[in-house]
């Protein structure tokens, strides 16, 4: 979303499901609702979903593109998961897991810096 010009606060709001804290328009919200269903429960997508998008102003070409991109990302993510590929370190991280910016006075979150320690094997 940031690559498309959305500010980081809106990206965080969408990613953490706090849309009331964003400036996402009703038209954009309708598209987000659609791609969420397409991603998580594709068998529930039907003509009515597309009609709702048309009613808020999306054109068929835009709906097709959103569907294509969403499906492509789902495929890519499933392939990455199946091969055990890690999430890129430069990707989006939840605010509570981010390290502070260099030079900031904000202490790191305990969640961001703590890593679980494994118990030593006792035989």
Image (cartoon, grey):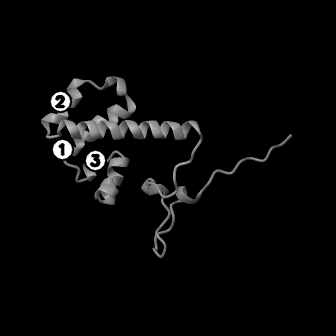
Classify 10 Å Cα crowding around label 1: few (below 14), some (14-19), many (20 and above): few
* Mark 3, secondary structure of its residue: helix
Give the alpha-carbon distance from disc 1 to disc 2, as whole Å: 15 Å
Q: Mark 3 points at which residue?
A: 19
Q: Can residue 33 be seen in this view?
A: no
Q: Assess disc 2: are there few (<14), some (14-19) or many (≥20) residues with their C-alpha within 10 Å of its C-alpha.
A: few
In the picture, the quarter occupied by the C terminus is: top right
Location of mark 1 (residue): 26
Return the x and y of residue 100 as percentages of the image width and height: 48, 67
Across and down, in percent, residue 60 comes to 19, 35
Sequence-first disc among 1 and 2: 1
> Which residue is disc 2 drawn over?
51
Residue 38 appears left or right of 62:
right
Q: Say which of 62 and 93 sits in front.
A: 62
Discs 3, 2 touching: Cβ within 8 Å: no
Residue lying furthest right = 123
């Amino acid at each position: 979303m940031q690559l498309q010009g959305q500010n980081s606060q809106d990206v965080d709001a969408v990613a953490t499901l706090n849309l009331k804290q964003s400036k996402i328009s009703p038209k954009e919200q309708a598209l987000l609702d659609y791609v969420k269903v397409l991603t998580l429960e594709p068998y529930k997508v039907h003509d009515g979903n597309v009609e709702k998008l048309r009613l808020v102003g999306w054109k068929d070409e835009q709906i097709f593109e959103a569907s294509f991109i969403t499906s492509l990302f789902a495929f890519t993510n499933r392939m990455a998961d199946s091969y055990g590929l890690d999430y890129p370190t430069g990707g989006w991280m939840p605010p509570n897991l981010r390290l502070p910016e260099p030079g900031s006075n904000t202490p790191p979150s305990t969640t961001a810096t703590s890593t679980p320690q494994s118990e030593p094997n006792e035989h």
